[in-house]
Image: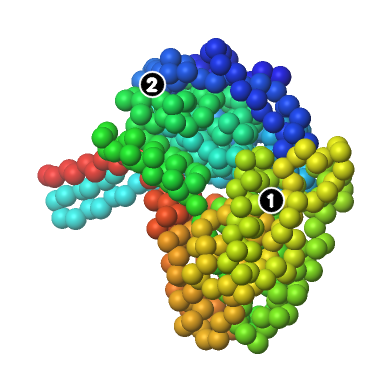
Amino acid sequence: MLLSSFVGGEFVDSGELFDNVNPIDGSLVGKVSEADQSVVDKAVRAARSTFDGVWGRYTVPERVALLRRIADKIDERAGELLKAEVADTGKPVPLATTLDIARASANFRAFADILAAQGIDAYHTGQLLNYAVRKPLGVVAIIVPWNLPLLLLTWKVAPALASGNAVVVKPSEETPTTATLLASIIAEAGAPDGVYNVVHGFGPGSAGEFLTKHPGINGVTFTGETKTGAAIMQAVAPKVVPVSFELGGKNAAVVFNDADLERAIDGLARSTFTNTGQICLCTERIYVQRGVFDDVAKGLADRAKQLRFGRPDDPHTTSGPLISQAHRKKVLEYYDIAQQEGAQLLAGGGVPKLGPALDKGSWIEPALWTGLDNHARILREEIFGPVAALVPFDTEDEAIRLANDTDYGLAASVWTSDLERGHRVAGAMKVGIAWLNTWYLRDLRTPFGGAGLSGIGREGGLHSLNFYSELTNVCVGW
């Protein structure tokens, strides 16, 4: 299979090809055509042409109807999208079905509803009437990572199109397929040519750099690692292009003595091991009040030992591989660092032996550690794997201090049966989202983003529309 870039309603190729590799067994999924600078330029110009033309004349009801047709088309082709997502990521089929594919259509429907219901600011004071006019930015660059390729892509494309922008998408080189399939879905739904464009490639010296530095880009939204976000910020700084970044995380969980331990351990297992730890919201630091520390450590270690590796369509499979051999090498280096720092290993910590059919994949065992404090590298640096370090604490103030002792600020979870304390501690977390007695539940209308090294800005609901729009205040006097 050859994946091509999608520009102005047509699939186009350039000279260089790169491999798309299945992380389950190392097999070749297909070849991908790397977009050179001329292809990126054509994509931006195609987006600009439709933005200045037919797409720019779409009314709000017409955009709402298009978003809903796209959602319907995603549902119609869910099986095709699922097969592609599993081949690119290695996720178990049930996880990809309920997480990635379901959220793809939900994102378009949610923003169709939000756009249909949104109003404007208007203030009548004396002889003055002030009202706001919402206008699209223009051409928006959307750069998405490999961990939740379709989910995060649609999370950005839906509000960008709802706001009236045209987009140029650069998917991860590790997971290029669903972004390409979405191009044909959006076209089938009736979007004008040039509204949605895809350019395949890498970062520096490739499509990512060409796109972010292009003078025709009016905004950049990116989800991925912090150092890439910093590079994008440098690229757009001379043009003062607005950016929305959701970056890395070193997320904390806080478990108090009075927590429902079975519920807390189940929640911690999900937040540590879901998608093999490859979700920006996963937990890598777990602070447990001393009275229940041993119970939580044993319970979570037992959950880790119950994980089952295997092919995505095997009903017994609970865990897939890491995305690539390169990423596994990085995570295993942190396993070595933990050992060098004197960590005590509770479970896992190596590479499973799964037989000749799978051993060429990017498999890894989870790792749970105790015996270290916040000075250790494995408690300070994002690992992005199925890992967590458990640290005891005594008082509420100590728990807050430990959880906030990080350069990141994406997410946290708090586990307690004392709801007054739960609200107090969750509110004290220096993060974009804090969960109380749960994890990974969200209302798509709420603000989402990070603080510190975890990002800039908020998306979700009207917060997304505000990023993808310019607001002009009109002041009328009489």
**Of labels 2 and 1, the one closer to you:** 1
Q: Earlier in the sequence, mark 2 or mark 1?
A: 2
The residue most toward the front is 340
Q: Amino acid at mark 2?
A: Arg
**Residue 4: x percent and y percent?**
60, 18
Residue named by callout 2:
48
Sort mark 1 into few (<14), some (14-19) or many (20+) by Cα contacts within 10 Å: many
Q: Quadrant of residue 254?
A: bottom right
| Residue under the image location 44 percent in, 73 percent down | 428
**Residue 347: x percent and y percent?**
75, 65
Residue named by callout 1:
275
Seen in the picture, residue 96 relative to 295 is either above or below; the reply is above
Q: In the shown orientation, is residue 108 left or right of residue 78?
A: left
Residue 251 visible in this rendered orientation of the protein = no
Sort mark 2 into few (<14), some (14-19) or many (20+) by Cα contacts within 10 Å: many
Q: Amino acid at mark 1?
A: Asn
For the image shown, how many numbered marks are present on the structure?
A: 2
- Specify how the rendered protein is coloured: rainbow
Q: Secondary structure at mark 2?
A: helix
Q: Secondary structure at mark 1?
A: helix
The disc label shown at residue 406, or none: none
**Residue 365: x percent and y percent?**
74, 55
Looking at the rendered image, the quarter that the N terminus falls into is top right
Closer-to-camera residue (56/11): 11
**Residue 228: x percent and y percent?**
44, 42
| Residue under the image location 45 percent in, 60 percent down | 408
Looking at the rendered image, the quarter that the C terminus falls into is top left
Question: Marks 2 and 1, how far apart in space?
Answer: 37 Å
Q: In the shown orientation, is residue 381 left or right of residue 257?
A: left
| Residue under the image location 51 percent in, 83 percent down | 396
| Residue under the image location 68 percent in, 83 percent down | 292
Q: Quadrant of residue 151?
A: top right
